[in-house]
Structure formats: structure tokens, C-alpha cells
Image (spheres, rainbow, N blue to C red):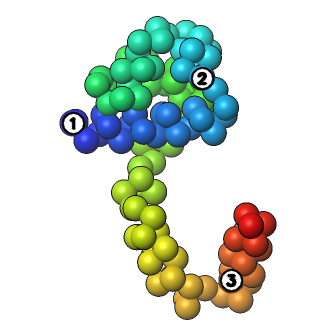
Amino acid sequence: MKDLRKLLGIRIKELRQELNMTQEQLAEIANIDIRTISNAECGATFPSKCLIDIADALKVKLPELFDFEHLKYDDTQKIEYIIEKLPSLTPQEIETVFRVVKAMR
């Protein structure tokens, strides 16, 4: 359960930061105590009683709070995964990847 708490905390923080939201703002929108957010983000507690409120405040569906797949890879593993998958992409998919990467630079 400790790993789940930690991953959930990282995910909540990630989603909150994507919305340029502070912990205080999230707590206010979700109508929960700031300590609940803080403890959840650092993996100290599992906010089971307010998960739906947190998801709603973050504008995601509840299952999206548990989307940890991208958190399981370090940067080197992500690069290796991309390189491994490139040969199987269609020309249109390669074009999309190219445009996304080019837009980032």
C-alpha cells in the first residue's frame, strides 16, 4: 500500500501542477483540509474519503488519478521505449511524433 500512496501522491501533485494550482487552491476547490492534500502528495496518507472530490477539483475522472504508467520509467527508459517503438509506426504517426518533438524545441 505504501507504493500506491506514493504513486498517488506524485500523480495528484503532477495533475495539480499541470493546472498551475497550489495545494491551497486544490484544497479549497475540493473542500478539504490543506493537510489532507499535503499528506496525500507526500505519500503519508491515502485520501480514500475524498478521492472523488480531489479528482473533480483536478478536472479528471477518478481512474485518471491512478494512471501511473508513465511514472514507472526514468528518462533513459522513456527514450529507449520511444526508439524501440519508432520502427513500427506508420508514416502518419512518425509525422505526428516529428511535429510534436519539433514544436517542443
Q: Is residue 95 above or below residue 62?
A: below
User: Is residue 101 toward the left or the right of residue 66 in the image?
Assistant: right
User: Is residue 3 toward the left or the right of residue 104 in the image?
Assistant: left
Amino acid on which disc 3 is placed: Ile
The residue positioned 68% from the left and 75% from the top of the image is 97
Q: Count the marks.
A: 3
Closer to the N terminus: mark 3 or mark 2? 2
Q: Nearer the viewer, residue 31 or 39?
A: 39
The residue positioned 42% from the left and 70% from the top of the image is 76
Percent coordinates x, y for residue 72 in the rendering: 36, 57
Q: CA distance from mark 3 to mark 2?
A: 37 Å
Q: Which residue is mark 2?
A: 22
Q: Is residue 63 above or below residue 75?
A: above
User: Is residue 43 toward the left or the right of residue 32 in the image?
Assistant: left
Would you say residue 64 is visible in this rendering? yes
User: What crowding class fits label 1: few (fewer than 14 Cα within 10 Å), some (14-19), or many (20 or more)?
Assistant: few
Percent coordinates x, y for residue 22 in the rendering: 60, 23
The residue positioned 66% from the left and 87% from the top of the image is 90
The residue positioned 46% from the left and 8% from the top of the image is 33
Closer to the N terminus: mark 1 or mark 3? 1
Q: Nearer the viewer, residue 49 or 21?
A: 21
Q: Which residue is mark 3?
A: 94
Q: Which residue is mark 1?
A: 1
Would you say residue 47 is visible in this rendering? no
Amino acid on which disc 2 is placed: Thr
Amino acid on which disc 1 is placed: Met
